[in-house]
Amino acid sequence: MANTENEVQVSATAKYVRMAPRKVRMVVDQIRGKQVDRALEILQFSTRAAAEPVAKTLQSAVANAENNNGLRADNLYVKYAYVDEGPTLKRIRPRAKGSASRINKRTSHITVIVAPRKEA
């Protein structure tokens, strides 16, 4: 089992994406473990706004695999995909009677890791 860890993994990261991590995770959960072409198809027809930056990150990971590691795109699958929370932009919204309330504008760091599918 220890010899299976030496396979090639290629990653791409999109940082400071101006979307809440919770919303982006809903999209990322749909593509985890899928073939790359199937994952891009799912993202293309998704109605969520987060599908666009996730698709760009996935395409970047595939391009990295092709150009830097010489892998074929039709043999790749999404091995890992996760979203981390970035810095939060804190804004103030005026409220009744001269008070104010906090608006948190959250950001995300999207990471997609692709690997070649093992032949059984």
Image (cartoon, rainbow, N blue to C red):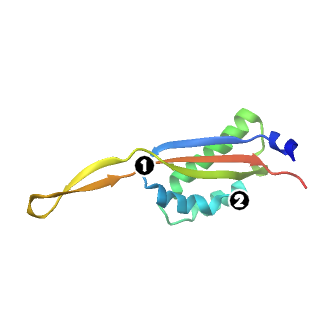
Q: Nearer the viewer's eye, disc 1 or disc 2?
A: 1
Mark 1 = which residue? 107
> Which label belongs to residue 49?
none
User: Mark 1 falls on what kind of element?
Assistant: loop
Q: Would residue 98 be found to the left or right of residue 75 on screen? A: left
Q: Earlier in the sequence, mark 1 or mark 2?
A: 2
The image position of residue 95, as x and y in percent, is: 16, 61
Kindly identify the residue that appears in the image at 81 percent across and 51 percent down: 117
> Which label belongs to residue 34?
2
**CA–CA distance between discs 1 and 2?**
25 Å
- Which residue occupies the foreground of this view, 101 or 12? 101
- Which residue occupies the foreground of this view, 26 or 55? 26
Q: Quadrant of the C terminus?
A: bottom right
Which quadrant holds residue 100?
Answer: bottom left
Which quadrant holds residue 97?
Answer: bottom left
Give the class, few, some or many, for how many residues have Cα within 10 Å of label 1's Cα (few <14, many ≥20): many
The image position of residue 48, as x and y in percent, is: 49, 63
Q: Amino acid at mark 2?
A: Lys
The image position of residue 12, as x and y in percent, is: 61, 41
Farthest-out residue, front: 2
Q: Amino acid at mark 1?
A: Thr
User: Mark 2 falls on what kind of element?
Assistant: loop
Kindly identify the residue that appears in the image at 71 percent across and 35 percent down: 67
- Which residue occupies the foreground of this view, 61 or 94? 94
Farthest-out residue, left: 97
